[in-house]
Image (tube, rainbow, N blue to C red):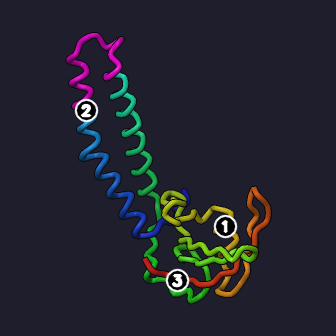
Amino acid sequence: MTHAPITAKGAKRLRAELEELKSVKRPTVIAAIAEARAHGDLKENAEYHAARDQQSFIEGRIKHLEGELSHAQVIDIATLTAGDRVVFGATVKLADCDTDEERTYQIVGDLEADIKLGLIAISSPVARALIGKHEGDTATIEAPAGTREYEIIAVSYLD
């Protein structure tokens, strides 16, 4: 089995989510199921069915997180010495060559990716186009909307 890379910060965030699921959300939904059972007939009890659905989701998420974290390779970004080269964990500031619009992304593991937070998966087309490049290089990214070119303005390894 391969070990999926994950940043130390991402692993910490996922472990916190796992702990919340186990210690807060699981007991809450178990109590909701018990309360709904007390209302009587389970066939037509919408509260019971909703609580069971929620319990199923929580248990599935717990199993998923436990499995992924047990096989993850945690990488401490602070120890990387890649200089101005883009590797896993790098925070990259890009400028669109056509519009001069700037964007900043951090390349992280698939499990911790969240585009709203500027965290892109190492397996994404953008990350694959950036890996191995240096500050000042131009990266060509194949996107559904067409080919885009970005200049790499800065590369840093801050966690």
User: Where residue 104 sits: x, y (%)?
Assistant: 56, 73
* Residue 29 at x, y percent in the picture: 28, 34
Examine the rendered structure and indicate whether residue 62 appears above or below residue 145. Answer: above
Residue 142 lies left or right of residue 105; in this view the side is right
- Where residue 59 sits in the image (x, y, percent)? 37, 39
Q: Which of the numbered marks, if any, corresponds to residue 95? A: none
Instruction: Decide which of 138, 89 is in the foreground and name it.
Output: 138
Q: Residues within 10 Å of mark 2 (few under 14, many from 20)?
A: some
- Name the image quarter holding the C terminus: bottom left
Read off the magenta span: 31-47
Q: Residue at x 41, y 57 (%)?
A: 70
Under mark 1, the amino acid is Val
Does 98 appear above or below 23?
below
Earlier residue among tags 2 and 1: 2
- The residue depicted at 28 percent of the width and 46 percent of the height is 22
* Residue count near mark 3 (Cα–Cα under 10 Å), binned few <14, some 14–19, many ≥20: some
Residue denoted by label 3: 156
